[in-house]
Image (cartoon, helix red, strand yellow):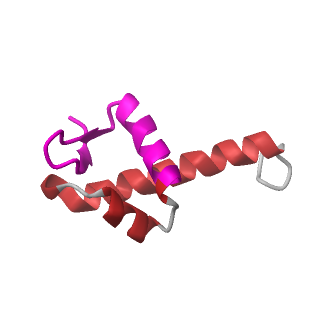
Amino acid sequence: MDAETGTASEVAGAQSVERATALLMLVARFRRAGAGLGEIVAESGLKQPTARRLLLALMRTGLVEQDPVTRRYLLGP
């Protein structure tokens, strides 16, 4: 099913998956140094609350983790 034939909910769900995947790839580019939220927002073009919400979802699944000291985002283990 493509975006033209899907329901609004399905299209929004697919968009969230695409955005989360893009954030995951962006965090991966920063490797061990990690990416700050400001860097992620600037490079992704997402608004800060959207980026943070997606990062939290990625953290819940273990794909991304946040350094408790630097607050930078890194790929999960």
Q: Quadrant of the N terminus?
A: top right
Residue at left offset 66%, top offset 42%: 13
Q: Position of residue 12 (x, y in %)?
A: 70, 47
- Is residue 48 positioned above or below 39 on the image? above
Residue at left offset 81%, top offset 45%: 8
Residue at left offset 49%, top offset 68%: 45
Q: Quadrant of the C terminus?
A: top left
Q: Position of residue 59 (x, y in %)?
A: 35, 35
Quadrant hosting residue 26: bottom left
What residue span does the magenta drawing correspond to? 49-77
**Per the image, is 9 magenta?**
no
Question: Horizontal placement of 15 versus 76: left or right?
Answer: right
Question: Horizontal placement of 20 versus 40: left or right?
Answer: right
Q: Nearer the viewer, residue 7 or 50?
A: 50
Residue at left offset 55%, top offset 52%: 18
Question: Horizontal placement of 47 versus 5: left or right?
Answer: left
